[in-house]
Image: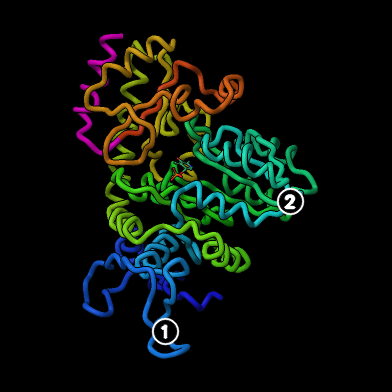
């Protein structure tokens, strides 16, 4: 099965470095024209040379050269063995969950992405999967949540939007002692900032919609795997369920990953500077950012992250004050999503996390006065000026 679509497997020289991998991983000049950029193979089928003889591609749900290039690229970027492109981050998560069967139990980071919570609680419970939401930032809480039926530890770090971290190496060692596989949703950090497979995780999930594409113009997802049994099943399920990323979106993400290191360096420096600015501002109650010494897991962040990412959250003291701020920013866009070059500002309690029951929201630290910022790559002074004038009106 593995040899069927070879470009899905990493082919890059072993010693290539991260920035080089982002640009060249999974890609070779187009064999028919020499085009340096992998074309958008907008086709549904492939003409066979003769009966039973084809060039590696038969039908485009099963394989597409643009998608294969993206998959090779993402596998290399995450340091995995193979990657699989999906129609969205949720489709990628859905595919990973098909590794399980009825009766299996999953330990999940408690303040994770709202859509993942919805998938687990309102879809997968119907198929007799069981979930325990634990504060995975505390390894003892993981141990307490494990049952004899636990097959998967599903981590998100940093979490959305409370930016709590899980020690990936510690959690992976613990899970493996119990024969449990570890999956990390790495969307928030991006592989420039954090590579979970290096710390022992078995699977990585991405919403490529966010930092990997980076330009707010595509929806997609990916799974990166290292274990042969996982790779074999994901190859099968990607074709069997068919929730594939289309060639146009695969091409957009490939274009995005070429500049991932450049963008992430700026996201990192802009977010840190904004976090420091907000923390020092008299109208802001508190700031959560892993790069601040005030973050309870600042030390862990320095170990498992490179820079501290583009996301930060801050508290305005009341929902009314938060509303005034949100309604007065001009450059920053009031919008859901994250990871694009544009700075986005949002109100988790009524936007991204509106589907999470109010009491659960409070448990996981999403108060009504919380504002989330996905800091873009604009000029830092313009960002400070914009939020500064909005804070003046509070
Ligand atoms: C956006 C997001 C998802 C879902 O991805 P889609 O591409 O919107 O389906 C999953 N996890 C995290 C952390 C996200 O930010």
Figure quadrant of the N terminus: bottom right
What is the secondary structure assignment of the residue under circle 1? loop
Q: Position of residue 183 (x, y in %)?
A: 58, 51
Q: Quadrant of residue 281?
A: top left
Q: Nearer the viewer, residue 93 or 248?
A: 248
Q: Which residue is mark 1?
A: 54
Distance between mark 1 and mark 2 Cα atoms: 38 Å
Q: Nearer the viewer, residue 75 or 128?
A: 128
Q: Position of residue 84 (x, y in %)?
A: 48, 61
Q: Where 288 sits versus 156, above or below? A: above
Q: Which residue is mark 2?
A: 102
- What's the colour scheme? rainbow
Q: Nearer the viewer, residue 215 or 242?
A: 242
Q: Position of residue 364 (x, y in %)?
A: 57, 26
Q: Quadrant of residue 326?
A: top left
Figure quadrant of the C terminus: top left
The residue at 39%/64% (across/down) is 67
Q: Which residues are magenta?
A: 376-394
């Amino acid at each position: 099965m593995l040899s069927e679509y070879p470009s899905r497997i990493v082919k890059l020289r072993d010693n290539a470095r991260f920035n080089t991998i982002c640009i060249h991983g999974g890609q070779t000049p187009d064999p028919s024209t020499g085009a340096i950029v992998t074309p958008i193979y907008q086709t549904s089928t492939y003409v066979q040379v003769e009966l039973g003889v084809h060039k590696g591609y038969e039908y485009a749900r099963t394989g597409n050269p643009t998608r294969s290039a993206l998959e090779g690229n993402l596998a290399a970027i995450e340091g995995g063995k193979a990657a699989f492109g999906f129609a969205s981050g949720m489709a990628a998560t859905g595919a990973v969950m098909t590794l399980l069967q009825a009766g299996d139990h999953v330990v999940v980071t408690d303040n994770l992405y709202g859509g993942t919570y919805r998938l687990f609680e309102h879809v997968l419970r119907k198929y007799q999967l069981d979930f325990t939401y634990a504060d995975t930032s505390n390894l003892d809480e993981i141990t307490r949540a494990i049952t004899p039926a636990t097959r998967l530890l599903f981590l998100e770090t940093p979490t959305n939007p409370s930016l709590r971290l899980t020690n990936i190496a510690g959690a992976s060692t613990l899970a493996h002692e119990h024969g449990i596989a570890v999956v990390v949703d790495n969307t928030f950090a991006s592989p420039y900032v954090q590579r979970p497979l290096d710390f022992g995780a078995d699977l990585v999930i991405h919403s490529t919609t966010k930092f990997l594409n980076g330009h707010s113009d595509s929806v997609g997802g990916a799974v990166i795997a290292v274990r042969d049994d996982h790779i074999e099943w994901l190859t099968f399920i990607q074709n069997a369920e068919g929730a594939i990323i289309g060639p146009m979106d695969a091409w957009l993400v490939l274009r995005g990953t070429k500049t991932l290191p450049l963008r992430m360096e700026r996201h990192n420096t802009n977010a840190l500077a904004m976090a420091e600015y907000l923390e020092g501002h008299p109208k802001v109650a508190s700031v959560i950012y892993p790069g601040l010494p005030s973050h309870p897991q600042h030390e862990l962040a320095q170990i498992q992250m490179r820079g501290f990412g583009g996301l930060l959250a801050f508290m305005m003291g009341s929902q009314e004050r938060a509303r005034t701020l949100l309604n007065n920013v001009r450059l920053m866009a009031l919008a859901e999503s994250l990871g694009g070059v544009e700075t986005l500002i949002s109100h988790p309690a009524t936007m991204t996390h509106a589907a999470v029951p109010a009491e659960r929201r409070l448990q996981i630290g999403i108060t009504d006065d919380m504002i989330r910022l996905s800091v873009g790559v604009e000029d830092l002074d313009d960002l400070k000026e914009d939020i500064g004038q909005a804070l003046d009106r509070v």
